Image (cartoon, rainbow, N blue to C red):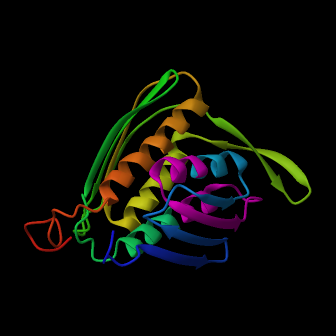
Amino acid sequence: MLGMPQRIAIIDRQTKETAIKIELNLDGSGKSQINYPIPFLAHMFNLFAKHGLFDLKLNAKGDLEVDEHHLIEDTGLALGEAFAKALGKKEKIERYGHIILPMDESLAEVKTAIDISGRPHFSFKAKFTKQAMPTQIGEKIVKLYLDSEMLREFFESFVYKAGISLHIDLVRGKSSHHKIEAIFKAFGVSLSKACQLNPRKKGIPSTKGTL
């Protein structure tokens, strides 16, 4: 949109457990460059960017020899921080986004609302059997597993740093892969809607005058 500043962010998160760098453009075209040591989740982040029309570069590594928890949680923290930074003052954003999205036999309903009021909230209703994720650790290929609680950790971390309200309801499905894919696609689309700029709006979309 002419006259509006670029909504981009660069986050470089370094800890003793993980190293994560993110470059995000909210007003992109869905291009992504994902360098992530867990190929299954790399695929999910590609889908998230593609369907959310976010330009996303993600480079990450972590102590997978311990387990996948640190890396997945910290990725959520870094990505949430990137969105909060890119949104800036949040002027003229739609603020709300919602979609019901099918993935073959799976159906995910995701409600997303941007609400930077100090009251981030996450609701998660999704169950699936553990999804095997072949991952290279050093010279070895090992199987890590993603379950609903681990996915919850990712989204809770994102919500905490982004300062949004996020509700995820997985309605039905058989394949764990399809269920998780439906969630990430729906998350991307609904978040994209919430981040969209509306030229009819003036200032911050809140009667309080702040988010």
Tell me the quadrant of the picture where the C terminus can be found.
Answer: bottom left
User: Where 16 falls versus 138 (above or below)?
Assistant: below
**Bounds of the magenta segment:** 46-75
Q: Residue furthest front?
A: 2
Q: Is residue 94 above or below residue 186?
A: below
- Judge by depth and name the residue closer to the eye, 175 or 147: 175
Q: Is residue 30 left or right of residue 209?
A: right
Report the front residue among 72 and 205: 205
**26 or 156: which is nearer to us?**
26
- Tell me residue 121's x, y (percent): 30, 56
Pinpoint residue 69: horizontal percent, then vertical percent.
61, 56
Question: How many labels sit on residues?
Answer: 0
Magenta residue check for 28: no
Q: Is residue 179 above or below residue 192?
A: above
- Residue 204 placement: quadrant: bottom left
Question: Residue 53 in magenta?
Answer: yes
Q: Position of residue 195 (x, y in %)?
A: 33, 60
